[in-house]
Image: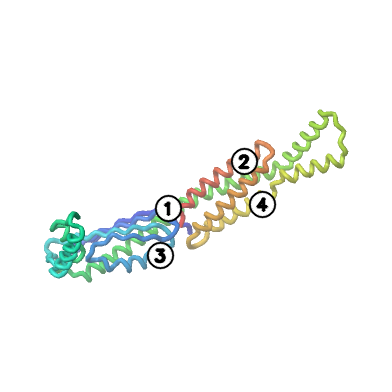
Amino acid sequence: MVHSMTAFSRQETKAPWGCLQLELRSVNQRYLEPHFRLPESLRELEPVFREALRTRLARGKVETALRFDASETGETLSVNGERLTALATALQEVRSTLPDAPMPDALALLGHPGVLESSGLDLDAIKASATALFDDALNDLIDGRRREGEKLKALIDERLVAIGELVADVRARMPEILERQRQQLKDKLDALDVELDPQRLEAEVVMMAHKADVAEELDRLDTHVAEVARQLKQKGPVGRRLDFLMQELNREANTLSSKSVVADTTRCAVELKVLIEQMREQIQNIE
């Protein structure tokens, strides 16, 4: 089943100790690229979240933003003296080396990790709740990616049908096109009033037909279209494979265009490339 890489989920939970809000955002990316913004008191949950993303997602840039608002009755704040002293010592060394460097104010120092500590909170309960919230958000995100993927698949299927119709049209008209080219060559020779050996004329016609023959390109287009349709029905990530198939489809469309001997086949080749490019843009969002 096709999954998109674009989705969003927002989950929230409230308890006596406060409120947790979590947002997951996912956009297209060649590989899985997770980013986290977590409160310092819950920073140790990052490896758990990272592993969950790695297990359930294959591609996409995924941003995780967790916000924790403690209740006024459930938390007391205190300054970690050792941490603050170590920070002050480090700042003094910086001042001695760079006397003109701006120094942070007291509020900025309190915002440094580990300086301001909270107490009176059941961190184990908060972490368990945050983990459950993340699982809910991830499930919702994956559902969103699946729904978006179904829409992308429908758009690609429409274009596959259109490509198949164009290929069938060119294939059906090739005998007529080749015969028209043969007649045009004969008419030019008749207009010049030049006698040409019939065998030589036939050889020229065969050479012309060989240069204009696109049967192999049409066969490969049909094969690639069938493979794209098959990949769209597979389980697991298929985005990279589909991207490769778009390159192959475009290659055959370019060859068809270069072998074109009439305006009709040139027009078909252009329409093919437009449809292929439209599919390629959609496939960029497929996992």
Q: Is residue 33 left or right of residue 155?
A: left
Residue shown at 63% from the left, 42% from the top: 257
Say which amino acid is labelled 2: Cys
Say which amino acid is labelled 4: Asp
- Secondary structure found at label 1: helix
Mark toward the start of the polypeptide (1 vs 2) = 1
Which label number is shown at residue 158?
none
Q: Position of residue 13 (x, y in %)?
A: 24, 61
How is the model colour-coded?
Answer: rainbow
Q: Mark 3, mark 1: which one is toward the viewer? A: 3
Disc 1 crowd, CA 10 A, few/some/many (<14, 14-19, 20+)? some
Q: Mark 1, mark 4: which one is toward the viewer? A: 4
Labels 2 & 4 near each other (Cβ < 8 A) = no
Mark toward the start of the polypeptide (1 vs 4) = 1
Mark toward the start of the polypeptide (2 vs 4) = 4
- State how far apart marks 3 and 1 are (Cα): 17 Å
- State how far apart marks 2 and 4 are (Cα): 15 Å
Q: Which residue is mark 4?
A: 219
| The quarter of the displayed image where residue 111 is located | bottom left
Q: Report the front residue among 142 and 270.
A: 270
